[in-house]
Amino acid sequence: MSLQGKSLVAVLVGLLVMGLAACATQTAVPAQAVPQPQVAPPTAVPTEVVVIPTEAPLEEPEPVNECLVCHTDKDMLIETAAPKVEVIKESEGVG
Amino acid sequence: MAPLEPWQKVLVNGLAFLDTVHGHIACVDCHGGDQEQANKEEAHAGLIARPSLDPQAACGDCHHNVVATQVNSLHSTLAGYTKVLETRSVPENHEALGEMFGNHCASCHTTCGDCHVSQPHEVGGGFLSGHLFVRTPPMTRTCTACHGSRVGNEYLGQNEGLRADVHFRQGRMTCVSCHTGAELHGQPANCNDCHSGPVGSEMPERHHRYDGVQSPSCGSCHVTATTGQDGNAMHEQHSADLSCQVCHSITYSSCDDCHVAISEVTGNPFYRSGNTYLTFFIGQNPIRSGQRPYRYVPVRHVPIAPTSYEFYGDNLLPNFDALPTWAYATPHNIQRNTPQTESCNACHGNADIFLTEDKVREGYVEANRSVIVPLVPPLLDEDGRPLANGLTITNGITVTNGITDTATQP
């Protein structure tokens, strides 16, 4: 083998070794647990609560049923009744 | 029925009503209007005073089975009036008669509320019981408020000197004791479901309220009497050829000559009926059938005349003679003992109580040919046999063995 041929083989071998080494680095590293930072459990910290004064909630009033107000009140019905219309009775005899 | 004051008609029994099923429905859901307005006019804007004029909208959601048939009931359709008008008329007159009907007859149309909430509108209205819904309407404030001048007066004994019907007087029965809610609501929708014939038979189309099987029927309670099996010789002899009322009803009302018009003074429709009088006449059964095989039935004069509707046109009833003016009747004044039950000859040979031709007014004879009794049944001897020389003279009519000799009329 000529010197030129040996050099070429050496280069190819070198490239192969470098490629294998690169792959081996990526897969051979064992997965290690990533260390988690230690966080202290939350604790209640007394804080001063500022109470903002608000108006007391208003209760929704029951809507007044004006129908019943009037129609259960005899006096109101008498007061608001339409004036009696004199009906002329024109029919005669037994119906 | 005493008229109510305006406030009485619309005073709601609030405590009682709100405690009922219908009391949980908002007023405006049925009646429209505005329940938040205290002012009467504003509250009543869009008011529906009689919601059940549209029964489906007012009542149909819950009472769909009743509403479905009620609209076809006689109380709703008044079909009986239409039937007799059309029978006596011709199609080209139907439009004029329809206008007449709308003005004078249609107001009798009955709604759900007219019986179950209020007194009928036609007789002034007004709550029956503070707007509570009444399952069984009170007889005198609903049924006889409309059916008063004949049936009501007879049944309640309000014709002077005449006793009330025994079913009311002693039985305390009301209309619905016989005329059930189902019947009044037009149920079932097919009349023949109740008024059917024997199994396998085909009933003809119903043209008359007395077509088909009797329902209600005296025989529903008095089975042995109506079949002649109660040991009563009269029932045995006559149960097939006399309707029960021939022997067991008493004098009842008849009317003549009702005329209708629109008032020139007020623009309102009005009627004027002629004579009203008490009668008892036995006529021939004009609709004899297997279900009503009777040869004789009581007949009542109905207030119709050839000129009854002349305000709406000339000669609107050209077929006036197509129906009798003495109509097959079922008077509601039943008694156990009547003048007819006193003896055989209370009827036999007694022309006074038979509708003979001489009792029919001039011009009405042809119309009544089907009910006029041509031969009065002959007098009977003590053994119940026709007298060979039976003879009676009544009102100038000579009756010999049941043969009426009209030639002897004065």
Image: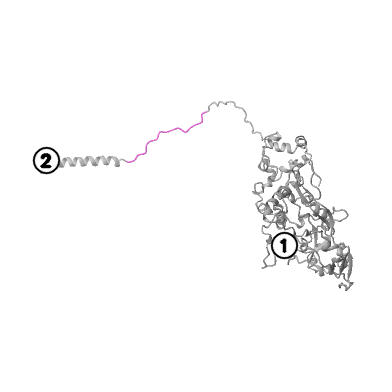
The x and y percentages for residue B179 are 75, 56
The disc placed on residue A54 is: none
Magenta span of residues: A30-45
**Disc 1 from disc 2: Cα separation:** 131 Å
The x and y percentages for residue B28 are 67, 40
Q: Residue at x 77, y 56 (%)?
A: B177
Callout 2 amino acid: Gln
Q: Quadrant of residue B42?
A: top right
Decide whether residue A48 is among the magenta residues: no
The disc placed on residue A4 is: 2
Q: Residue at x 67, y 57 (%)?
A: B189
Mostly what secondary structure, the magenta segment? loop
Outermost residue toward the left in this view: A2
Q: Nearer the viewer, residue B322 or B380?
A: B322
The disc placed on residue B211 is: 1
Residue A9 in sight from this viewpoint:
yes
Q: Is residue B383 left or right of residue A79?
A: right
Q: Quadrant of residue B359?
A: bottom right
Q: Is residue A8 left or right of residue B228?
A: left
